[in-house]
Image (tube, coloured by chain):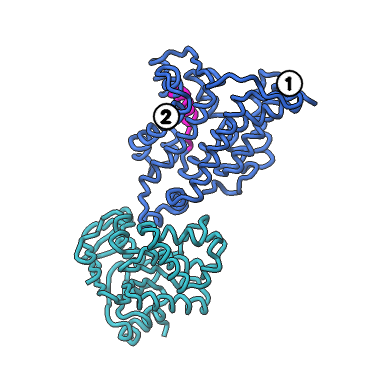
Amino acid sequence: MMLEMDKVCAAYGPSQVLHEVSLKIHDQEIVTIIGSNGAGKSTILKTICGWLGTTSGQIQFAGERIDNNETKDIVRKGISISPEGRRVFPKLTVLENLEMGAYVCTKREFEEEVERVYQIFPKLKERTKQLASSLSGGEQQMLAIGRAVMSKPKLLLLDEPSLGLAPVMIDTVLEAIKIIKESGVTICLVEQNAQLALEIADRGYVLETGKIVLEGMGRELLRNEKVKNAYLGL
Amino acid sequence: MNIFLQTIINGVIVGGTYALMAVGLTFVLGFMDLVNFAHGELYMLGAYFTYFFVVTIALPHIIGIPLAILVAMLLGLLIERFLLRPVWDKDILIRMLLTVGLMILIPNVITVMLTAVPKKVPPPFTMSPFILGNVRVAPIQLLIVLVSVFIIVLFHLFMQRTRLGKAMRATFQDKEVAMAMGIDTKKIYAYTFSIGCGMAAAGGAMLSMIYNVFPAMGAITTTKAFAVVILGGLGNFAGAILGALIVGVSESIAGTYISSGYKDAVAFILLVLILMVKPSGIMGKKGGIEK
């Protein structure tokens, strides 16, 4: 078991956002969490990476409790995030962004990883000395994902990687996600684009107003009537 | 013409030390959103620490001045840890008032401990001025401006080239994401403040060799450094340096051609004029502070 959330509750100030969320992510899986805007998908990732404390429940990573640990320590355990809205460091260059991604690594590891990221995203290599703010949305998304894999995570959290991207860019990003998965990284993918997410996911969870209402294999969920009506627009 | 040239040279030399003060201030302001009214107090302490190391215990300047800067940086770490860290998440006004408190507290503590009688730090050497044509430059002044430039360049290289410098920039561009990279942002805050303090102290340490050292020297320096920083554009390093040179040269011109009594007013008159034309400062960007 890579990650297990057990009845996790979380709140922003007085308003509770997650209600006893339980989910499991096995080694080498792509697990997706789908749901509408404001359902709490991103909040789940925030509690995993330590940006948001939990109010109750447990999160275990590789058998070790990590809920309410400091973010900087959680990265060192092997969890890394490509956040919603990309959030690359705008005034650092592409290479410097990747260097920050490898902050917990040695220099040699950084040099190896940067080559690997440039193989996955050749476009980034062309832009290596440019400021991240000068990249297009798609390139910034590549950079955010590239930066997140620099630390050689065991578990990669991807928050809305397709948001606001042109279809051709989405394909590139999806290809990259598959390559990253094949290299042995477990992925937790949060998406509003349910169709796309369920197609590449092994398993999926459906989140509604902070509660898990459905879970199943990716293909099953794609055929599920409720999912079709609510999220696939069919 | 010779007087004019001399005036400009003097202005550039003064401007060089202003630049050091302003870069330290704009660094802390731009990166940490900390309006540090105690910046000049660290400048003052830098001068007093220099007095202590160089005069009281008679270390050579080359050891005493770096030690003075180091002690100021350590003091900066303590101030950050015990006073600022509890209020980083609070309103910017609370932090600002805290530095105002330090601005009042520190010089008064020094006055109580050492009295307000001005002290002097002798320069490390006495040399007759360099004479180029009809322009005279005192070697100590030249040394001070060169050291200022050296520190600014060193600081720039540190921020651009080192892992820690990049982590600082990353932290202040997006703190949450920086944490997710594994950066210990609490430490980054402490180091950043400490470096700002070190730059202020470096200015004080060097000027202690040509000016009197007294408890109230920090306040005017703070206000002038703010004038320079706002003039150049908040958080903009190049702007801070340009602003410092403009203020230094204008003061020098006013001192020569109007009256040295009005010298200190020049920075503020310039500030008002520039802000009327370009409210974001000479090199500042619209809509706020650059990181």
Q: Callout 1 environment at 10 Å: few (<14), some (14 to 19), or many (20+)? A: few
Chain identifier for the blue-coloured part of the image: B
**Quarter residue A127 falls in:** bottom right
Left or right: residue A42 compared with residue B284: left
The CA span between labels 2 and 1 is: 40 Å
On the same chain: label 2 and label 1? yes
SS at mark 2 in the image: helix
Lower position in the chain sequence, tag 2 or tag 1: 2
- Residue at image position (55%, 21%) is B125
- Residue at image position (42%, 49%) is B164
Q: Identity of the amino acid at label 1?
A: Ile
Q: Where is residue B80 in the image (x, y as percent from the top left)?
A: 37, 37
Q: What chain does badge 1 belong to?
A: B
SS at mark 1 in the image: loop
Left or right: residue B271 compared with residue B38: right
Give the residues in magenta: B35-49
Q: Can residue A229 be seen in this view?
A: no
Left or right: residue B265 compared with residue A65: right
Residue where numbered disc 1 is placed: B258
Q: In this view, does B171 lie above or below B209?
A: below
Foreground pick, A94 / B51: B51
Image quadrant holding the N terminus of chain A, namely bottom left
Q: Residue B67 carries which label?
A: 2
Specify the farthest residue to the left: A63
